Image (tube, rainbow, N blue to C red):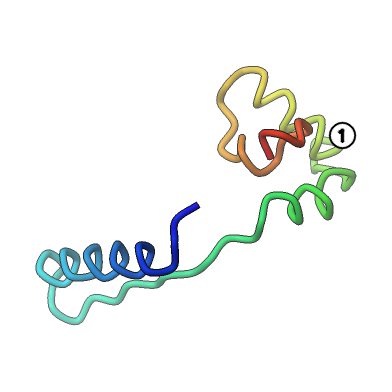
Amino acid sequence: MTSTTEFKANILTILGKLNATLPKGSHVWIFGLAPGVDLYKFMGNRTHPLGITYEQVYDFLNCLEISPCAGWMNSNETIR
């Protein structure tokens, strides 16, 4: 995992590059992501609009290797 000091340095570097690149008056929004363990715990057994569980949807997408959330919504606890 990235240390707090390294994370802060990386973010400040990125923001500096954006400040030099983006048009004046632009805004940047930075937000954190929920831990995958929590996402899976709360979403895995819920029903997806397709009528199956989110676990089944994301297992299928992971199998096809096209999941946008392979590291978060994964029934394999080691990967999650």
User: Left of 78 or right of it: where is 65?
Assistant: left
Q: Quadrant of residue 19?
A: bottom left
Identity of the residue furthest to the top in this view: 64
Residue drawn at 24 percent across, 63 percent down: 14
User: Left of 29 or right of it: where is 48?
Assistant: right
Amino acid tagged 1: Ile
Q: Is residue 45 above or below residue 57?
A: below
Q: Nearer the viewer, residue 67 or 3?
A: 3
Residue drawn at 61 percent across, 39 percent down: 71
Number of on-image labels: 1
Q: Position of residue 2 (x, y in %)?
A: 44, 56
Q: Position of residue 40 (x, y in %)?
A: 77, 47
Q: Position of residue 31 (x, y in %)?
A: 49, 69
Residue drawn at 74 percent across, 50 percent down: 37
Q: Nearer the viewer, residue 4 or 11?
A: 4
Query: Which residue was labeled with disc 1?
Result: 52
